Image: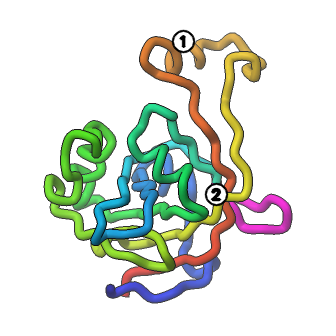
Amino acid sequence: MSFRKAELSELGFDPFTKIGKEWMLLTGGNSTESGKWNTMTASWGQAGVLWNKNVVTCYVRPNRHTFGFIEEGECFTASFFSEEYRQALSFCGSHSGRDCDKAKETGLTPVETDGCVTFEEADTVLVLRKLYAYDLCEEGFLTEDGIQEKFFGEGNPYHRAYICEIVAAYKKD
């Protein structure tokens, strides 16, 4: 693996760009050999400080195949890629690991780091330890500006939010 451990301060991590525009792969599971992992594209999340820890909050719908892998493990990864991998990320967000081998279909190379799975092609990898989870729900919305109708409902269940400590960061050499 051609990653080196990095300090968060050297990543130049802008969550508005990295998460919202460039997207990330959330990957749960711990073994590339056994096939006990899955990945999905995500474009919703936050990064900041909570409980005196550097954290990322990720959102996963319970009907996603990756959900079970994230639920089972203590940690998972958020991997960020250059624009040349946009098509691979698009594929991972629109196809289920229940029905296909995402690594084979995209050409991404799964690798293990810190007991988690990520990808050799990633530019930046955050290893995330789950601290707290909660489910979004209809009753939690404080406005009536169409968010619920646009993002939830028939076939689109409410997400589970995972507040995670960033326990390690890796940067491509």
Residue 89 in the image: state x and y as whole percent: 30, 51
| Separation (CA) of disc 2 from disc 1 | 26 Å
**Up-down: is 86 above or below 13?**
above
Residue 94 in the image: state x and y as whole percent: 28, 37
Displayed quadrant of residue 64 = top left
Q: Residues within 10 Å of mark 1 (few under 14, many from 20)?
A: few
* Quadrant into which the C terminus falls: bottom left
Which disc number belongs to residue 53?
Answer: none
Helix, strand or loop at mark 1: helix
**Dominant SS type (magenta):** strand
Classify residue 75 as left or right of residue 119: right
Q: Which segment did they paint magenta? A: 47-56
**Up-down: is 98 above or below 158?**
below
Residue 40 in the image: state x and y as whole percent: 38, 48
Residue at 40% x, 53% y is: 22
Helix, strand or loop at mark 2: strand
Task: Examine the structure image and report whether residue 52 is included in the region drawn in magenta.
Answer: yes
Q: Which residue is mark 1?
A: 149
Q: Which residue is mark 2?
A: 56
Residue at 45% x, 55% y is: 26
